[in-house]
Amino acid sequence: MSTLATSLPPACPGCQLRFHCVCHLVPSIEAELHIALLMHPNEPSRETNTGRWLEKSLASCSRHVWQRTHACPKLIELIQSDRYKAYLLYPTEDSQPIVTMTDYAEQKQPLLIVLDGTWQEASKMLRKSDWLQALPKLSLQPTTHSRYQLRRNQQPGHLCTLEVGAQVLSELGYQRQSEQLEHFFHHYLKVFQADKSGHALKPDQDLK
């Protein structure tokens, strides 16, 4: 084992960062909706995954792993619940803007299913899942570009999962909660990049 490896501080078991733990900075958010993250099997093990931060932040958020041969039983249970009206949050030609939802008038909470993976993986997940294709589809109307830079070959106009969560909250009127997520996300990006460079975030790099 190299001297460099043995001199590094241990990674935090929560955020996996070595030099600047962010676990205590994760916001605690509540909203009258449920976001179900349907993750590609490759996604949970990726250190660049931001869905885990949405799950930790939003009280009404759940994680489900997509399988090619069958639907996730717990997610199907949510979809069939009388409490929710399920939608797939995915941009297609027949997607409707998220603000057009009428669930509140029907006294049902919206259940928003978000495909969590690379854009290519998300497209495959939808293509291979008839039960997803059958759901009504909603889309977002972001007014800013993504700040996510932790993966290569990001497509213009695509948001990472945590940014999707913040945009959902913003478009549904939860502006303060959206700003809380955005603030944490921008700080986390700086901390993560510093951590991978082998040092803690310098004071002049932090968000003011």
Image (cartoon, rainbow, N blue to C red):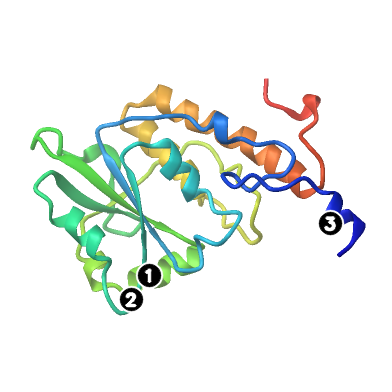
Spatial CA distance of label 2 from label 1 is 5 Å
**Amino acid type, label 3:** Ala
Spatial CA distance of label 2 from label 3 is 42 Å
Image x and y of residue 179, in percent: 48, 26
| Quadrant location of the N terminus in the rendered image | bottom right
Residue 88 in the image: above or below residue 54: below
User: In the displayed structure, does residue 107 sit left or right of residue 55?
Assistant: left
Q: Which residue is drawn at 50% across and 60% down?
A: 44
If you read the primary sequence from the N terminus, does the residue marked by circle 1 or circle 3 appear first? 3
Spatial CA distance of label 1 from label 3 is 38 Å
Q: Which residue is drawn at 18% across and 58% down?
A: 77
Q: Contact, CB < 8 Å: mark 2 with mark 1?
A: yes
Q: Name the residue under label 1.
A: 125
Q: Name the residue under label 3.
A: 5
Q: Which residue is drawn at 41% across and 41% down?
A: 165
Question: Which one is closest to the eye, mark 2 or mark 3?
Answer: 3
Q: Contact, CB < 8 Å: mark 2 with mark 3?
A: no
Number of numbered tags placed on the structure image: 3
Judged from the image, the secondary structure of the residue bearing numbered disc 2 is loop
| Quadrant location of the C terminus in the rendered image | top right
Mark linked to residue 138: none
Mark linked to residue 128: 2
